[in-house]
Amino acid sequence: MLAGYVSLFFSSLIAATLFPMGSELVLIGLIKNGWPVVTTVAVASIGNVLGSVVNYVIGYLLHRGFMQTRLKVYKANLIRAEAIFLKFGRWTLLFSWLPIIGDPLTLFAGLSRVNFSLFLLLVSVGKVARYAVVATSV
């Protein structure tokens, strides 16, 4: 049983970083096999939030030029995330679960030095809500 939660945790964590990966199938598979919904949503959410924290820290510690050249963050995604972030503010972090733009939003939050507690709250709310919706649709 522990192996299933570990797999879910790491797939969720990796899915929230710059590496393209999904975690919803692991979550759905566990729930369909009778695993507790609340626990699976919690494990997936914790992993996914921690992945976003990795992005935040990268953005906080590194400058944009390094991210574009060394980490291969596509400039268009970073520019799009920056524009949305600047237009709508910190509240965009509620949508950090979105594909393509969510990861750059969390990177830009770090670059912008968003208060970490606020970052953690907004990202957590969005990601828990997403996994709860996925879990209840099974």
Image: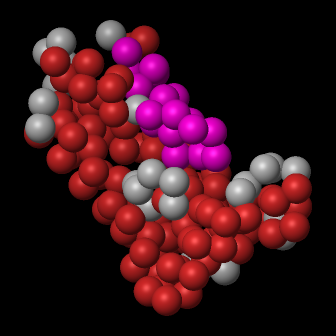
Res. 43 in view: no
- Front-most of 16 and 42? 16
User: Where does residue 60 sit, x and y in percent of width and height?
Assistant: 73, 68
Considering depth in this image, is 75 or 6 the residue closer to the camera? 75
Instruction: Tell me residue 9's x, y (percent).
Output: 45, 30
Q: Is residue 10 left or right of residue 54?
A: left
In the picture shown, does residue 134 fall above or below 80? above
Residue sitting at 66 percent across and 80 percent down?
Answer: 112
Q: Work out whether residue 59 can be spotted.
A: yes
Task: Give the magenta-colored segment's residue range.
Answer: 4-22
Residue in the image at 25% along x and 19% along y? 30
Residue 121 falls in image quadrant: bottom left
Residue 112 magenta-drawn?
A: no
* Front residue of 64 and 110: 64
Q: Is residue 41 above or below residue 6?
A: below
The one of 93 and 71 positioned closer to us in this rendering = 71
Q: Residue at x 63, y 39 (%)?
A: 19
Q: Position of residue 104 (x, y in %)?
A: 60, 62
